[in-house]
Image (tube, helix red, strand yellow):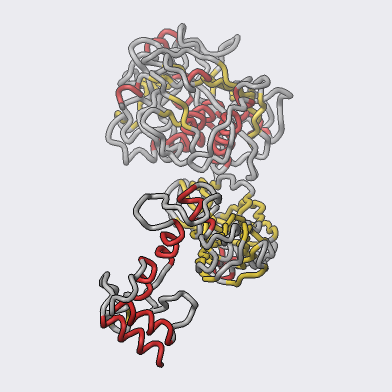
Amino acid sequence: MKNFIKNILICTCAFAVNATYATQITIVNLDGAGEGFNDNTPVLPVGGNTGETIGSQRLKVFQYAAKIWESIIDDDVEIKVDANFDPLTCSSSSAVLGSAGTVNLNRDFTNAPISRTWYPIALANSLAGSDLSSLSDIKATFNVDLDNNNNCLNNTNWYYGLDGNKPWNGLELLQVVMHEIGHGLGFQTFVNLQTGSKFGTPGRNDAYMLNLEDHSLGKTWASLSNSERLASITDSADLHWIGSNVTANIGQYTAGINQGHVRQYAPSSVSSGSSVSHFDSAMSPNELMEPFITSTPEGPGLAIDLMKDIGWQIFSSFVPVLGEISDQTMSGSSSQVEFALKDLDSSSLSFSFDSSNPSLINSSGLSVTGTGRLRVLNITPNTGVVGSALITLNVSDGVNAVSESFQLTTTNSVPIITVISPADGANYILGDTVSFQVAATDTEDGELSENTQWASSIDGELGIGTLINTQLTLGAHSITASITDSGGLTSSTNFLVNVYGDADADGMNDLWELDNFSTLNRDGTGDFDLDGINDLDEYLILIAVPDGDLNRDGVVNVIDILIAQQILNGLKIITPVQLVHGDISPLVNDVSVPDGQFDIGDVMLITKKATN
């Protein structure tokens, strides 16, 4: 992957954005409707980037990159960047990611450190303390073809996250934008790479080349002839940066250093837009301002020191860089929001919070977890409170602090109610016990099942609870289960329960008749299954219980004793229905366990029940 990415060229480029620091870098969007920053293709937020379209995510990457540079350079004059996305060179193996540079140069302005020397306009403005041009300061164009294009780097896409956690087939746009802003701020020479001549007529030095030497000749670039500079442009070992601020901080580097100086990129064949205006590609650890992407540096690195060498004022310590937190609307007990965070000179950060509405949420309901460049804000409003609050997250590294505010709105969600039993359209026989059971939950209140109210369209209120058992009267019942949460929102569900009786007065329950005959036209005298038992007796056997009530009058008395004795003595033939009612022995734990026979044991138990 490293060798593959090394084929991806970064030209002198830059991009920028609105910021909240004293230094201000502003994007001037040059894209037309529906393209570049204005591409409305919907996407999901990623890696701390809250944008919901490709265009807005691109913009937020540039805004974040600009914030990082704003935390570094100390400038009272606004820096404007004309920026857009266009198709640039791209093949299956290599691509130009972007091209950029200063819009203009200036020299001999008020407070110019060195006379007759060209400075990029952003730096010239900063040194002069005023805007020397009505034009923008940097022009940048980025390659739009990287997104969703199989013919461009084999479908390698821009990664718009701010967390440095790009996927295997992604290129981190943030890193490229950081690199390009560096060029626009002055990390570039204006020497003609084809002739070695200085810029202008007559040719004059630029602030960048004043810090270059050809070590083999022992001369600075300012003192070289055109032909000597032209030769130096391709002298990889001997083209050095000799600025004191860069040189003072090279001790950690194990490659890309020669004779106590940083080597500049000087390949044997001149590479327009890359030669001279980058650190050498051999630098180790890798640097942001190398010509090729080889890794993801944590920050500008030595480029900060180079900016000092060419004349920029640099803050003595860097404020934390905090990504945008979008407004949040939530229901429920808690929520989590990702945000980007970066500090170039401190890893020890503290967090505090302000809330405009402590009754909704106070600082105890806010916390930050995670490490590195992507953090998580945990939000826990006070229970049962609905409303809005302006939340401010404050981040401090002990020296500098930054804050980000967003609007939090909490809403009350409707409870969710689910009937477990009975099923919709369930059928019962008159006298059956119906079990009603429900599960009811609420995002804010949690488990609410025990407060469920049950009602019937025929019988009215049935009871309150998670589980109730009751008998219903005849008819088609529309059953309603409802629940109300602490915020006053009610949720309900309806379902049908049918209770059948004997509408045709034939002694058989209508539901049983419909299940077996699909009609109510049979009167009970027939034998539908031809088993020798008429229809009515079939039904009576089904509903019969071993209770000793042989004449089915609802009581066990002396008449049942007489019938039992007659059957036992062979004076009566027991009917199938009587067998079910009369087979009550033996008893197990005082419960009848029928054995399929009618004998003396059954007669004795019937006698006992009748005389008690």
Residue under the point 35% across and 87% down: 607
> Observer-nearest residue: 585 or 185?
585
* Residue 157 in the image: above or below residue 61: above
Q: Looking at the image, is 572 positioned above or below residue 12? A: below
From this viewpoint, is residue 121 visible? no
Q: Nearer the viewer, residue 361 or 235?
A: 361
Residue 441: image quadrant is bottom right
Side (left or right) of 31 relative to 519? right
Which quadrant, please, contains the N terminus? top left
Which of the 4 image quarters holds residue 293? top left
Residue at image position (58%, 36%) is 52
Image-based side of 169 in relation to 143, left or right: left
Q: Residue furthest bottom?
A: 612
Considering every residue shown, the one lying at the far front of the view is 571
The percent coordinates of residue 215 (x first, y second) are: 34, 22
**Residue closer to the observer: 472 or 364:** 472
Determine whether, in the image, residue 566 is placed left or right of residue 402: left
> Image quadrant for the C terminus?
bottom left
Identify the residue at the far right of this view: 134
The residue sitting at 59% across, 24% down in the picture is 120
In the rendered image, the vertical position of residue 392 relative to residue 554, given as above or below: above
The picture places residue 205, in percent across and down from the top left corner, at: 53, 19
User: Residue 32's spot in the image, x, y percent?
Assistant: 67, 19
Q: How many marks?
A: 0
Q: Is residue 592 visible?
A: yes
Residue 312 percent location from the top left of the image: 56, 36
Q: Would you identify the image quadrant in which residue 126 lies?
A: top right
Please name the residue shown 39% across and 33% down the image. 167
